[in-house]
Image (cartoon, helix red, strand yellow):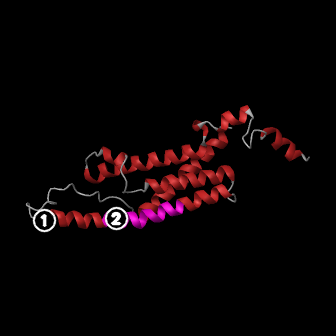
Amino acid sequence: MDEFSAKSGSLMDNGGVSTSTSSTSSSLSVFTNYPLISALASFAVAQFIKFFTLWYRERRWDLKQLVGSGGMPSSHSATVTALAMAIGFQEGFGGPLFSVALVLACVVMYDATGVRLQAGRQAEVLNQIVYELPAEHPLAESRPLRELLGHTPPQVIAGGLLGIITAAVGHVIVIFTR
């Protein structure tokens, strides 16, 4: 038995589950999960930027901006990009885990500029049609559809850049706190 097999055998005697107490407790801690923290931080920063951008443009506060979709920058793009970059920094950019995260990020960003953007534009048209219906029409009093669903390419690019910056800053913090 070679050295690697001996080490992995002693740690993986429980059906492939690590039995090392110190590595298990630290690796399962959500609070030290750098990719997760990076993704959540990027999401929060993107949502706060949207919140303050709306105030700057329209001089009004809208708390829905803290949790809503659509707008500049794309929080979905920021989240998945930060996740992919953090996984790349932590696990390496050549591994399968980074590949999965990168594909996920590409799918989310493509969907934001494609399907969701078009659904938002269709909602705008449908809302206008319903608005123009006569008052006696059964649909005249229906609740308007949400129009801000997707993102324009600049919003997605800005979200992606925010995600990269957030993951890079997080990586620097991880390096200096070791």
- Of pointers 1 and 2, the one earlier in the residue sequence: 2
Residue at the image point whose x is 40% and y is 49% from the top: 49
Q: CA distance from mark 1 to mark 2?
A: 21 Å
- The correct choice, above or below, for 21 with respect to 76 in the image is above
Identify residue type, mark 2: Ala
Front residue of 30/13: it is 13
Q: Quadrant location of residue 130?
A: bottom left
In magenta, the rendered stretch is 105-121
- Residue extending furthest front? 15
Q: Position of residue 123 (x, y in %)?
A: 28, 63
Q: Which mark is residue 119?
A: 2
- Residue extending furthest right? 1
Q: Which mark is residue 133?
A: 1
Assess whether residue 109 is covered by the magenta stretch: yes
Front residue of 124/49: it is 124
Identify residue type, mark 1: Leu
Q: Is residue 70 left or right of residue 37?
A: left
Front residue of 162/43: it is 43
